[in-house]
Amino acid sequence: MTKDTPEQEQEQGSFTAKDYHDPPPAKFFDSKELTKWSFYRALIAEFIATLLFLYITVLTVIGYKSQIANGNDACGGVGVLGIAWAFGGMIFVLVYCTAGISGGHINPAVTFGLFLARKVSLSRAIMYMVAQCLGAICGVGLVKSFHKTYYNTYGGGANELADGYNKGTGLGAEIIGTFVLVYTVFSATDPKRNARDSYVPVLAPLPIGFAVFMVHLATIPITGTGINPARSFGAAVIYNKEKAWDDQWIFWVGPFIGAAIAAFYHQFILRAGAAKALGSFRSATHI
């Protein structure tokens, strides 16, 4: 009986150990990376990407609100659909541009989920979040400096819970929306799937951008769609009005819970991390 070639094994859906390799878990705290230029280059990439993300998207939101306030046809401008495209499209572009440098997180919730899955160290996760929040503040600051009158008049693009919705509803929307996003990130970057479908790494920014787009369509009427604590925080810092700060906790707690659930679901359910850990434990007891 002849042995199947690797190509035949792949076609039959049986993968050998050589078909793919999970990267080793990141160190909890890696002091060595703090001495490397690549680490600081990644921080700069996250800062600039988040700055550009907030500048384009907040400007789109303000432009839409100004059109409606001036009595223009709601369908004549970008509309809610256009706002969702702006957020999803910018994530697609920026993830594509920065994935090879920093991983293209552009979102503290994504960074938090990857940290829980041991994809990044604690030191990198913290510094990424700082860079993202600073980038968001600077991005919204540019919007205000260039368009101050419109910015102050039309809400500064700040996330706020819409009238008619309670805080529990807003929190649930942020949890589920962030779950969708972070789950998509894990699926699009799964090394097992990348080994099976060679085109996946190239297309990874596309489903991530579409996830952001779809979540915005669903949750803009509820919370204005956060799912990114840096986006909500940057807008609140520059706008600095009471309502934006009153609801700010929703846009941190919700995304972090959603990211944690997505990390657990992907790593321990879909990738059978719990079963593997249990199997290793049982094997160890028989040694």
Image (cartoon, rainbow, N blue to C red):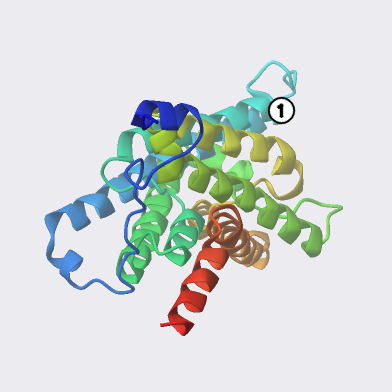
Q: Position of residue 135 (x, y in %)?
A: 37, 51
In-image side of 273 versus 19 (left or right): right
For residue 53, which quarter of the picture? top left
Residue closest to the eye, 263 or 35: 263
Q: Is residue 76 above or below residue 287?
A: above
Relative to 211, residue 64 above or below: above
> Residue 257: percent from the left, percent from the top?
62, 64
Mark 1, Cα crowd under 10 Å, few <14 / some 14-19 / many 20+, is some
Please state the total of marks drawn on the protein image: 1
Q: Secondary structure at mark 1?
A: helix
Residue lying farthest to the front in this orientation: 1
Residue 263 percent across, percent down from the top left: 54, 59
Q: Image quadrant for the C terminus?
A: bottom left
Residue 64: quadrant of the picture: top right
Q: Is residue 63 left or right of residue 14?
A: right
In the image, taking residue 237 as reference, residue 170 lies left or right, namely right
Residue that appears at 33% across and 41% down: 99
Residue type at mark 1: give it: Ile
For the N terminus, which image quadrant?
A: top left
Pointer 1 residue: 68
